[in-house]
Amino acid sequence: MRSEQFLRITRLLGEELVEVLHTKTVMVVGLGAVGGMCLESLVRCGIGRLILVDFDTVGITNLNRQILATYDTLGMPKTEVAKQRVLSINPECEVKTLSLFVQEQTMDQIFSEKVDLIVDAIDSLNPKCTLLQTAYERNIPVVSSMGAALRRDPSLIRTGDLMDTYGCPLAKQVRSNLRKRGISRGIEVVFSPELVRYTYKDPDEEAHADFNEQISNQGRKRNVLGSIPTITSIFGQNLAHLALRKLVGENELSGQEAWNPNAIKK
C-alpha cells in the first residue's frame, strides 16, 4: 500500500504496526449508521482486507445518519455502496461482500473464511446473538455495538465487557440471551447507560411503514427509533477503536497519563 497515504498513522504508531494492519482481515457485519462509520475509520487506518455483510439496501430514512447513504445511493445494496467507498479511499484494499441476512442458516457461509476480527454492528437481537455466539464458540475475536438509537448525550458513551454493561436495554437482552447459550465474559462492546426519553409506537401506526428500515426483507415489522448522527458516529468510532486495539494490542493504543494542572510547581 502507498506509504504516504498512511504517513500520519505511521508517525503515531510506527511502521511495524501499520504493516500489521495491512495484513489483517476484518469482517464488518451491519453497515448502518454505526457499522458504516466504523468501516470508514478501519479503511483509513489501512486494514488490508475487508468482508462486508449486510442484507439491506439504502433507504431515504438512512440519510440523516448513515455515511453510506446519499441520494445517489438510494435503493442500492449497502454492501455494494460500502465496497465502492472503501475502494475510493484505498484502492489496494481487498473487499469481499456478502449481501445476506444473519441467521443460523447463513452462519457457515459467513464464517467460511479465516478472519482476524469480527465487528458486530447489527441492530436486531436474534441475528446479533447468533453472530456473537458463533464467533465466541469458534474463538474468533469480536467487538460489538449495543444500542445507539434514542441516546442524546455523547459523554455517557462507554466501552467495556458485555457482562459489565448497565443501563442499556439491548445489552441486557444480549447478556441474558448469551448466558443461556453458555457464554460469559470476553466480548468487548460500546454502550450507553443513558436513560432514554421516548414514546414507542406500534409499527403498524408508523407514518412510513413501507420504508425498508422499518420492515426488513424477512417480513418482520420493527419500531422506528429516533437517532442523531453525532451519537451514532461516536458509537462507530469507538467501535473502530476497539477493533484496532484488538488488532495491534491494547498497550499500543492506550493513552498516556493525563496532564494534571495541580502538579505544576509554582
Image (cartoon, rainbow, N blue to C red):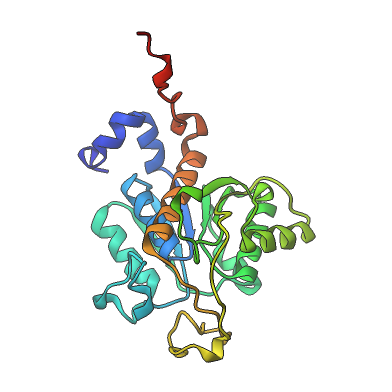
242 over 222 or under it: above or below = above
Query: On the rendered structure, is 244 left or right of 169?
Result: left
Quarter of the N terminus within the rendering:
top left
Quick one: 70 or 172, which is closer to the camera?
172
Q: Position of residue 187 (x, y in %)?
A: 63, 49
Quick one: 66 or 218, which is closer to the camera?
66
Q: Position of residue 15 (x, y in %)?
A: 33, 30
115 over 55 or under it: above or below = above
State which quadrant residue 60 falls in: bottom left
Q: Residue at x 26, y 40 (%)?
A: 6
Can residue 186 be seen from the camera position used here? yes
Q: Position of residue 74 (x, y in %)?
A: 31, 79
Q: Residue at x 40, y 23 (%)?
A: 259
State which quadrant residue 176 falls in: bottom right
In the image, farthest residue toward the left: 4
Can residue 115 be seen from the camera position used here? no
Q: Position of residue 171 (x, y in %)?
A: 63, 59
Quarter of the C terminus within the rendering:
top left
Q: Residue at x 64, y 63 (%)?
A: 169
Query: On the rendered structure, is 168 left or right of 22?
Result: right
